[in-house]
Amino acid sequence: MKKLLEMKLVTKLMYAALLFICCVFLSCDNPIITDILPDTTKTLSGSVMITGNNWIGETLTADTSFLGGSGTISYQWRSGGADVGTGSAGYVIAAGDVGENITVTVSRSANKGTITSSAVTVQYSITIDMRDAVVGDSLTAAQDTGNAGDTITLNYTVVNSSFYNELVFSGINSAVISGVSSDGSGTKTYVIDSSDASNGVINIIATFTHTNLIPDNITFTDTAGLITVNYGDAFTNAVTNAHYGSGAVSYSSSDTDVAVVNDSGIVTILKAGTTVISAEKIADLVYAHASKSYTLAVAPRIITVTPDTGQGKVFGADDPVFAYTVSEPLIAGDNFGGALSRIPGENAQTYAFTLGTLSAGNNYTLVLGGTESFGITRADGAAVGGAPTVFGVSAPGSITVNAVTIPANIGDQTAEYAISTADDGTGFSAWQAGVIFSCLVAGTDYYVYARSAGNANYNAGDYSVSAAIRFYIMQFSGNNATGGTVPPVAVLPGTVITLPAKGNLSKTGFSFGCWNTLSGGTGDNYAPGQTYTVTENSTLYAKWVAEQTFPFPFSLPVSSTPSASGITISQSGTGTYPRTATIEITNSGEYDSIEWMYGAFVLGTNWELELDAAEILYNAEGTHNLTVMVWKDGVPYSRVVSFVVVL
């Protein structure tokens, strides 16, 4: 029972420990987990809303209260689909936003994906400009903002203060709001039209008339309620003579910073903006005072700025001051400030111009014209450090040169190489990054060129050229061998090589004797291991010795009694073995000649040969082989004779 209780206690402790670990490390509220291991693969969830008044000058705010995820929030505001602001949760509505849909797109640093708000349409603002009103007159709009197509209710009151009590409307073009010809209260309607707006504001002018004289209306030459001109335009809009009274007519501007008007109705534009131009005829003895107004919208003058052609620089140089032409000069007294710019970037390519900081002030709208771009051309390539030199050659026809160096920090350029049989910069192969050239012809002079390779920002550099490089091929012919090969050797002129052994060369019925300069074996003999100076393309031929049994026995050495295993001689010439031993062959006259050969060396041509343990050719301790060749009627016969040298 005691053990059972102990086991239950241990189990409970383990469960408690596991529960503690889960609470600490798996809790959603644990900042260690979320900070160290942000799940950037998790898609952002939730929503974002836009709050705030939706007309000019108001600030819209991105409400992220219901946005999921974690990490820093980034913002991208858009007006009519175009980017208008980044990095801030708020956006101030500008005149150009009126009638456009505003959205905000948000993202979070610890999540993937974005979320975009529903669109908010920026509304037009409605203003009321009352003229000649007396106490009790009024005109109000049921709402002072709205979208295009919305119907606005206008509430009016015209007091009964004179025999004639009237109200007329002006300042808009899209529709005529009928006037009021008697005192009283009522409503009129206006449907918002974008053509009536100046910088997003629609100004309705209400002119009241209270008189005991005969009303006498005056009319401008241009009867439009909203007239739009450009800054710098000459503009005149005078009152016509289609009225009855004799009172003098005067003109005024509601904003003399925008425009002023003289007594002839000639308007002088001073800056971009909106003003109300009014004309007033004073009363005479019969006809009443009369007034008329229109809204004058002065738009910024559009100037097209066209960058000059052919502007550019070499990679790595500073940008020049960008030159440009304009579609027309500025109004006298106005000047440009700032400078043109371009799309950022320093790689060798073309970049579109931008207006940059160039400005002529608020009275102008600058438009970038033309299709010219700013070009950055590649800079001159680096000079390589010296000319290529030969590193080595290899068969059947390859040259390897030592790599040249490129000065550090020169645009990450690397070296490239080409080869030609001319040293005058013509006829070379395609450029390559490697230093090995193959498929070359032995005995031909070659020249290797090196230069810095062109890349995105640098042209290829000037080349350097090596001295003439020539190589020769030393061939080793099997000379009718029935098997095996000895590979050729490619070397530079004057190279001393060590001649190879026969390797796997074989010829049925023959033994390899040595190398010979002629295929018939009558040239110079060269033994494997012997040195050979290569001065041209050369071939050495295997010299084969027929493996045939002599039809006669060898005589025994004359001056020694050989052991049963063969002939043994000693350099000391003492003890069991003598220093010399004589071998002779008895020739009864049926053989024509004889050669005693040690490797490629002919030791003698007599029928008797004396072996001397002091001979430098075979004085090394160990077993040595002699090849004895005899000829009969031009046919060679050979036998190998072994002897031992001891010290």
Image (cartoon, grey):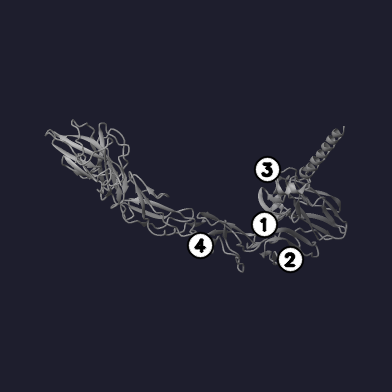
User: Which mark lies nearer to you, 3 or 1?
Assistant: 3
Density class for disc 3 (Cα within 10 Å; few <14, some 14-19, many ≥20) is: few
User: Which mark lies nearer to you, 3 or 4?
Assistant: 3
- Quadrant of the rendered image containing residue 270: bottom right
Residue extending farthest left: 589
Q: Residue 618 carries which label?
A: none
Give, as a three-letter code, the residue at label 3: Thr
Whichever of callouts 1 and 4 sits on the residue coming sooner in the sequence is: 1
Whichever of callouts 3 and 4 sits on the residue coming sooner in the sequence is: 3
Q: Can residue 389 be seen in this view?
A: yes
Pointer 2: what residue?
Answer: 250
Pointer 3: what residue?
Answer: 41
Q: In this view, does 580 lie to the left or right of 159?
A: left
Give, as a three-letter code, the residue at label 1: Thr
Distance CA(mark 3)–CA(mark 4): 43 Å
Pointer 1: what residue?
Answer: 228
Cβ atoms at labels 4 and 2 below 8 Å apart: no
Give, as a three-letter code, the residue at label 2: Ser
